[in-house]
Image (cartoon, rainbow, N blue to C red):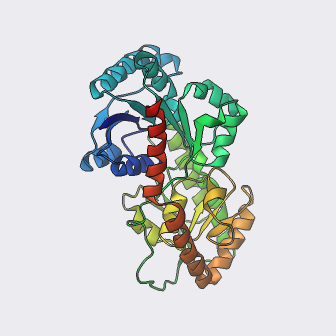
């Protein structure tokens, strides 16, 4: 077996990136590969990995570029080198590009090939700052997320685009559709500026002005940081400002996402991500904006709709249209499930990643 060391964004919660990493390490061919996941903190995700019998180590990895982390980061990097040695790691794969400096430190010490997974939209300056040019291979989750890499001068031979995947056996359409008086629209993800929950509330206000029967679910919670707590307060305040307390519901962090998806009639995403594949696999139509992987995951007019990023009015009008004709959403959802089966299967995703491993190991 070939030992591989993985670096996770966090161990205390499960976001889209953590779920994608879990899909990979639990479905990789363990006759050929032996994964070990390093989490910077303990909690829900680390425990999820342990329950799946994936070896997991907690090692705090301070932000590399912060001056306050100068001493701590080198101590952590040395511990990471020792861990890679003990595991006899033949590859190191980070699920969070911000850990690139740690990968390069280990690479310098052990000459181990390194892979960085790009799950966010970067600027060319960020590409240069995080030294992507020194990565042996880069995996981007969309063509759009690979664009800044190319603009920053990264060799295209180093870049592979692999769309996110979903567990089609866990996320699936409901066997029985129960009619409801409410049409439920959801947004899923950590409550943070990038996910744009405030814009979601703005959309809810415009819909409520036309149709009082539509409900809105904000699924997710804020991380325990000043920035994220402040943004969450602003989202709550906006709900009160528009007097939407009866129609906008904060569902908190959900560990039962397949069930949470079944409670929706429509998913809205204003930031892209694996939640699109989850909704489609659950037979739900998706409205997204042209950011990240959205345009490559949603087939406009077939499995959902791609609307202009800043046009909350157009998104609201589309929601009202779908709420008035639920059968239209059902038809779209059926096509979405078929598309998910053809495009977002775990097996295909894992095989593409394994192919990259094989190429690097051959030298």
- Total numbered labels: 0
Most foreground residue, 221 or 359: 359
Residue 265: x and y in percent read 53, 74
Q: Is residue 123 above or below residue 52?
A: above
Along the horizontal axis of the image, is 356 left or right of 125?
left
Q: Is residue 83 above or below residue 116?
A: above
Q: In the picture provided, is 302 more to the left or to the right than 60?
A: right
**Residue 5 falls in image quadrant:** top left
Q: Nearer the viewer, residue 116 or 320?
A: 116
Residue 126: give x, y in percent of width and height: 64, 30
Pick whichever, 206 or 73, lies toward us: 73
Q: Position of residue 305 (x, y in %)?
A: 67, 67
Whether residue 95 can be seen here: no
Q: Residue drawn at (55%, 43%), measured in percent from left and top?
A: 119
- Please name the residue shown 61% across and 49% down the image: 142
Q: Position of residue 173 (x, y in %)?
A: 45, 75
Residue at 36%, 57% in the rendered image: 255
Residue 362 seen in this snapshot: yes
Q: Quadrant of the N terminus?
A: top left
Residue in the image at 34% along x and 25% along y = 84
Looking at this rendering, what residue extends furthest in the front direction? 362
Quadrant hosting residue 79: top left
Tell me: residue 23, above or below residue 7.
below
Location of residue 238 with respect to 279 vertically, above or below: above
Please state which of residues 231 and 93 is positioned toward the viewer in this rendering: 93
């Amino acid at each position: 077996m070939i030992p591989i060391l993985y670096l996770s964004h966090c161990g205390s919660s499960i976001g889209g990136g953590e779920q994608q990493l879990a899909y990979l390490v639990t479905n990789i061919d363990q006759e050929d590969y032996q994964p070990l996941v390093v989490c910077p903190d303990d909690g829900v995700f680390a425990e999820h990995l342990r329950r799946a019998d994936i070896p997991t180590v907690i090692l705090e990895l301070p932000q590399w570029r912060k001056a306050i982390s100068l001493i701590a980061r080198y101590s952590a990097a040395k511990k990471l080198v020792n861990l890679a040695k003990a595991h006899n790691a033949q590859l190191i794969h980070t699920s969070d590009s911000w850990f690139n400096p740690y990968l390069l430190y280990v690479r310098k010490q052990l000459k181990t090939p390194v892979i960085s997974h790009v799950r966010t939209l970067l600027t060319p300056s960020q590409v240069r700052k995080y030294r992507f040019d020194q990565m042996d291979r880069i995996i981007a989750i969309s063509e759009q997320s690979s664009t800044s890499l190319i603009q920053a001068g990264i060799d295209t031979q180093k870049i592979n685009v692999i769309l996110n995947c979903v567990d089609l056996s866990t996320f699936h359409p409901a066997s029985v559709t129960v009619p409801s008086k409410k049409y439920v629209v959801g947004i899923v993800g950590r409550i943070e500026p990038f996910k744009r929950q405030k814009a979601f509330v703005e959309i809810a206000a415009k819909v409520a002005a036309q149709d009082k029967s539509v409900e809105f679910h904000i699924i997710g919670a804020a991380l325990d940081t000043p920035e994220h707590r402040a943004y969450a307060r602003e989202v709550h305040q906006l709900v009160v400002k528009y007097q939407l307390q009866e129609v906008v519901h904060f569902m908190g962090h959900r560990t039962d996402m397949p069930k949470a998806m079944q409670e929706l009639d429509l998913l809205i995403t204003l930031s892209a991500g694996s939640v699109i594949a989850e909704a489609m696999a659950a037979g739900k139509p998706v409205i997204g904006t042209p950011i990240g992987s959205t345009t490559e995951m949603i087939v406009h007019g077939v499995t959902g709709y791609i609307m202009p990023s800043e046009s909350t009015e157009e998104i609201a009008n589309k929601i009202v249209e779908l709420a008035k004709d639920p059968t239209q959403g059902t038809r779209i959802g059926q096509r979405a499930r078929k598309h998910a089966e053809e495009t977002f299967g775990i097996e295909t995703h894992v095989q593409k990643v394994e192919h990259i491993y094989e190429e690097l190991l051959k030298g």
